[in-house]
Image (cartoon, grey):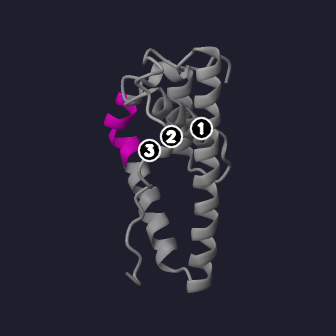
């Protein structure tokens, strides 16, 4: 991939610069992950290259179908987990969310130090990453 869009280019679908940054990172993960289906990989690469807008991608039946298929696949895999596997997965997710929170706090600190809020939003208006509610976790069969 030669030229890649910036976080700012995702502000039409993001609520704030931090969310745009996370979306950009997620698109890169989809584009580069060998375990991702070809259609989702294609969508991510098209958006990252600027050839397709994120709104267009979200409105595309082919891409939405691929996302739906992947979500159904993940749900089936989740339903087959043993209690031990589920506990291990939850621990990995907890560590990942902690890492994301630490990275967001570091980025916010760097923004405050250099005076660049990471987008058009003034630093005084930006939310502290610690104020973000915990991620939604669908109920498990045990709930």
From what the image shows, is residue 94 above or below residue 67? below
The residues bearing labels 1 and 3 have C-alpha atoms spaced at a distance of 11 Å
Q: x, y percentage for residue 83?
A: 56, 85
* Residue extent of the magenta highlight: 55-64
Name the quadrant of the N terminus.
top right
The residue identified by callout 3 is 131
Q: Secondary structure at mark 3?
A: helix
The residues bearing labels 2 and 1 have C-alpha atoms spaced at a distance of 6 Å
Q: Can the viewer see residue 51?
A: no
The residue depicted at 41 percent of the width and 76 percent of the height is 140
Estimate how packed mark 1 is, as few (under 14), some (14 to 19) or many (20 or more) residues with alpha carbons within 10 Å. some
The residues bearing labels 3 and 2 have C-alpha atoms spaced at a distance of 5 Å
Left or right, 28 with respect to 51, comes to right
The residue identified by callout 2 is 129
**Do labels 2 and 1 touch, CB within 8 Å?**
yes
Determine which quarter of the picture holds residue 26.
top right
Q: Can the viewer see residue 103?
A: yes
Q: x, y percentage for residue 16?
A: 41, 28
Estimate how packed mark 2 is, as few (under 14), some (14 to 19) or many (20 or more) residues with alpha carbons within 10 Å. some
**Do labels 3 and 2 touch, CB within 8 Å?**
yes
Which mark is drawn over residue 105? 1
Q: x, y percentage for residue 37?
A: 56, 50
Q: How many numbered badges does the structure rendering display? A: 3
Name the quadrant of the C terminus.
bottom left
């Amino acid at each position: 991939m030669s030229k890649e869009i910036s976080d700012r280019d995702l502000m039409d679908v993001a609520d704030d610069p931090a969310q745009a940054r996370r979306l950009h990172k997620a698109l890169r993960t989809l584009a580069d992950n060998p375990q991702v289906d070809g259609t989702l990989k294609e969508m991510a690469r098209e958006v990252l290259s600027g050839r397709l807008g994120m709104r267009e991608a979200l409105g595309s039946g082919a891409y939405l179908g691929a996302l739906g298929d992947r979500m159904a696949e993940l749900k089936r895999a989740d339903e087959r987990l043993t209690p031990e596997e589920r506990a291990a997965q939850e621990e990995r997710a907890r560590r990942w969310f902690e890492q994301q929170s630490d990275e967001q706090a570091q980025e916010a600190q760097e923004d405050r130090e250099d005076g660049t809020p990471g987008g058009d939003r003034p630093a005084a208006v930006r939310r502290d990453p610690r104020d973000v509610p915990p991620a939604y976790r669908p109920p498990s069969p045990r709930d």
